[in-house]
Image (spheres, grey):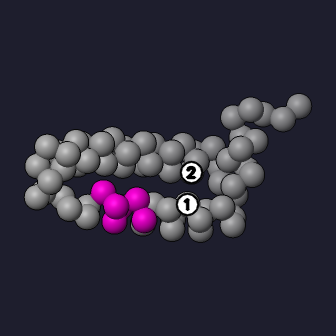
Amino acid sequence: MKNIFTKHPNEVGETYLEHMFNAMRYSLTFLFLFVIAFIHAILPCLFKKTASDIVCEMSSDMECRKGK
C-alpha cells in the first residue's frame, strides 16, 4: 500500500519533510504577495513590480523542481 503522505513528495523527488518545508515556504510567500498586491491596489505607486518579480522567481523555482 502506498503511503498517502509520501507518494506525491516522492514523485517530485523530495522527502515528506522537504516537501512540507517547500509547500510552507510557498504558502507564506503567497500570503506576503497578497499583502503586497493589496497595498499596490490601493496605492499603485508602491510595489510596482514586487509581486510580479517574485511570481516569476517562484515560477522558475517550480519549473526546476518539476524535473527532479
- Residue 33 can be seen, yes or no: yes
Please tell me how crowded label 2 is: few (under 14), some (14-19), or many (20+) other residues with Cα within 10 Å: few
Residue 48 located left or right of residue 26: left
The residue sitting at 69% across, 66% down in the picture is 67
Q: Which mark is residue 18?
A: 2
The residue sitting at 74% across, 32% down in the picture is 4
Please tell me how crowded label 1 is: few (under 14), some (14-19), or many (20+) other residues with Cα within 10 Å: few
Circle 1 is placed at which residue position? 62
Image: 6 above or below 49: above
Number of disc labels: 2
Identify the amino acid type marked 2: Glu
The quarter of the picture where residue 47 lies is bottom left
Secondary structure mostly taken by the magenta-highlighted segment of the chain? helix
Identify the amino acid type marked 1: Met
Q: Which mark is residue 41?
A: none
Task: Give the CA distance from mark 1 to mark 2.
Answer: 14 Å
Quarter in which the C terminus is drawn: bottom right
Q: Position of residue 31 (x, y in %)?
A: 33, 41
The residue sitting at 42% across, 66% down in the picture is 57
Q: Position of residue 17 (x, y in %)?
A: 57, 45
Near-viewer residue (11 or 46): 46
The quarter of the picture where residue 34 lies is top left
Image: 45 above or below 32: below
Residue 68 located left or right of residue 37: right
Chain part drawn in magenta? 51-56
Image: 12 above or below 61: above
Near-viewer residue (8 or 42): 42
Q: Position of residue 1 (x, y in %)?
A: 89, 31
Q: Nearer the viewer, mark 1 or mark 2?
A: 1
